[in-house]
């Protein structure tokens, strides 16, 4: 069966950040050197081929897009300097844009200016919305939930999170349907095999997500020579753990703290928030500095979406501590009220952008890894519990 080649995809991938990929002559060295490619996930060459042939659906529906953690080894060895590692990052942006029903992700990824202006617009919009709830508050002492009643903050947070979750769920369904349709899986979608659901869940959530095994490149000499506090896996892990901890602290707050009440710093939910905030700020600051210094292949090319996510997370952490300072260091009340408006607006911004920005990696990657780890029980018994090649 012949297939018509669509030559428009390669130039489109350039707009998503794969600016040198047209130099690729398909030698395959990148796949040979990739420490994460295996028989069940063959990349990056196969995905580059999809782009060269204009196979949009195949590219967006490949779970392999999410198997790459951008170590940069393929880019360092490519004889044509085609930057296959950067192509993989661009392919993830392309995939998110294909899953997104709103069409916003496409605009955000293709235009740096639109990305920056839209993020600023959202922050200002949320700030104005917050200020519109402002109530007369005492000037002698800080009373955050008198200034803006907490019930309003909770209502708008739940509304924004609900809309983002809906958009994200639709994206997730599109992604899973695409992966099952294209079927580069070790089981047959719709088949009658017994699948290793518990093992796949364990391997995904504990081994891969919490253990960060794919990020730990024990064979990379450059990484081994780097002090561990600034190694890639460590900074990525602190960002992830910081985010998950803050998410947990916020959820506990919603569930157990009476609306409008205050809890002291030593309360478990508050302590969890403070420790997680420190982790998040450390990880995002280290990642930002590495990108500024362009320390390796993976940080040489930074897309606007990389900067925006790190800056938003760092500022959300900073303003969170600004709020704690206002609470405990008796700073002027105007400081506390300003911090409250900026902090909540930034957090709402992050919620709103979750399904369409780089933040979406946290969900899409985990689901793709789960599908990668899902296989017939017999195969799991033959190959052991850790199918991920790390
Ligand atoms: S990206 Fe580079 S290493 Fe990979 S197939 Fe193309 S030319 Fe070869
Ligand atoms: S960046 Fe690393 S993990 Fe990603 S394709 Fe290249 S070698 Fe593989």
Image (cartoon, rainbow, N blue to C red):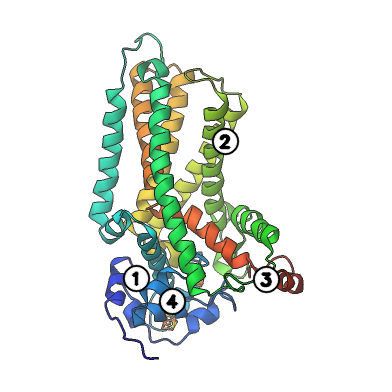
Q: Who is closer to the viewer here, 265 or 149? A: 149
Q: Quadrant of ligand 1?
A: bottom left
> Residue 254, position in %: x, y?
52, 29
Label 4 to label 1: alpha-carbon separation: 12 Å
Residue pointed to by mark 2: 275
Residue 75, compared with residue 341, is above or below; it is below
- The answer to which of marks 2 and 1 sits earlier in the sequence is 1
- Asked which quadrant contains residue 301, the reply is bottom left
Q: Is residue 329 left or right of residue 349?
A: right
Queried on whether the Cβ of the residue with tag 4 lies below 8 angstroms from ligand 2, the answer reads no
Element at badge 2? Answer: helix
Mark 4 vs 3: CB contact within 8 A: no
Please state the horizontal and vertical placement of residue 347, each as a whole percent of the image: 40, 37
Q: Are marks 4 and 2 in contact (CB under 8 Å)?
A: no
Q: Which mark is residue 47?
A: 4
Using the image, tell me which numbered label, if any, was put on residue 18.
1
Q: Nearer the viewer, residue 299 or 350?
A: 350
Marks 2 and 3, the one that precedes in the sequence: 3
Q: Nearer the viewer, mark 4 or mark 3?
A: 3
The answer for how far apart the CA atoms under marks 2 and 3 are is: 44 Å
Which SS class for mark 3? loop
Label 4, secondary structure: give it.
helix
Instruction: Tell me the distance, in whole angstroms, between the alpha carbons under discs 4 and 2.
Output: 40 Å
Residue identified by numbered label 3: 193
Furthest-bottom residue in this view? 1
Q: Nearer the viewer, mark 3 or mark 1?
A: 3
| Residue 225 in view in this figure | no
The N terminus - image quarter: bottom left
- Camera-nearest residue between 103 and 138: 103
For marks 4 and 3, give the CA distance.
28 Å
Left or right: 254, with 165 as reference point: right
């Amino acid at each position: 069966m012949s297939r018509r080649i669509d030559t428009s995809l390669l130039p489109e991938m350039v707009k998503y950040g794969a600016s040198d990929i047209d130099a690729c002559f398909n030698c395959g060295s990148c796949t040979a050197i990739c420490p994460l490619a295996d028989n069940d996930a063959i990349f990056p060459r196969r995905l580059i081929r999809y782009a060269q042939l204009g196979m949009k659906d195949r590219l967006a529906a490949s779970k392999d897009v999410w198997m790459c953690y951008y170590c940069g080894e393929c880019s360092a060895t490519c004889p044509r300097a085609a930057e296959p590692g950067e192509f993989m990052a661009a392919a993830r942006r392309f995939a998110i844009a294909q899953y997104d029903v709103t069409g916003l992700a496409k605009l955000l990824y293709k235009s740096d200016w639109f990305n920056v202006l839209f993020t600023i617009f959202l922050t200002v919009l949320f700030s104005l919305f917050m200020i519109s709830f402002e109530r007369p508050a005492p000037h002698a002492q800080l009373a955050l939930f008198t200034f803006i009643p907490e019930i309003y903050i909770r209502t708008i947070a739940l509304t924004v999170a609900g809309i983002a979750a809906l958009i994200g769920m639709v994206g997730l369904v599109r992604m899973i349907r695409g992966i099952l349709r294209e079927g580069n899986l070790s089981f047959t979608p719709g088949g009658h095999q017994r699948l290793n659901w518990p093992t796949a869940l364990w391997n995904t959530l504990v081994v891969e997500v919490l253990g960060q095994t794919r990020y730990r490149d024990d064979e990379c000499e450059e990484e081994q020579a780097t002090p561990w506090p600034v190694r890639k896996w460590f900074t990525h892990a602190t960002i992830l753990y910081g985010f998950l901890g803050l998410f947990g602290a916020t959820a506990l707050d919603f569930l157990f703290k009476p609306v409008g009440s205050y809890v002291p710093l030593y309360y478990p939910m508050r302590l969890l928030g403070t420790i997680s905030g420190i982790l998040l700020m450390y990880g995002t600051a280290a990642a930002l500095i590495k990108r500024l210094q362009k320390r390796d292949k993976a940080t040489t090319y930074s897309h606007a979406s990389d900067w925006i996510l790190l800056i938003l997370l760092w500022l959300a952490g900073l303003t969170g501590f600004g709020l704690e300072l206002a609470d405990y260091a008796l700073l002027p009340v105007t400081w506390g009220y300003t911090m409250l408006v900026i902090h909540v607006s930034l957090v709402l911004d992050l919620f709103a952008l979750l399904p369409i920005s780089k933040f979406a990696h946290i969900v899409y990657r985990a689901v793709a890894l789960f599908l990668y780890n899902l296989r017939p029980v017999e195969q799991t018994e033959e190959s052991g519990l850790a199918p991920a090649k790390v």
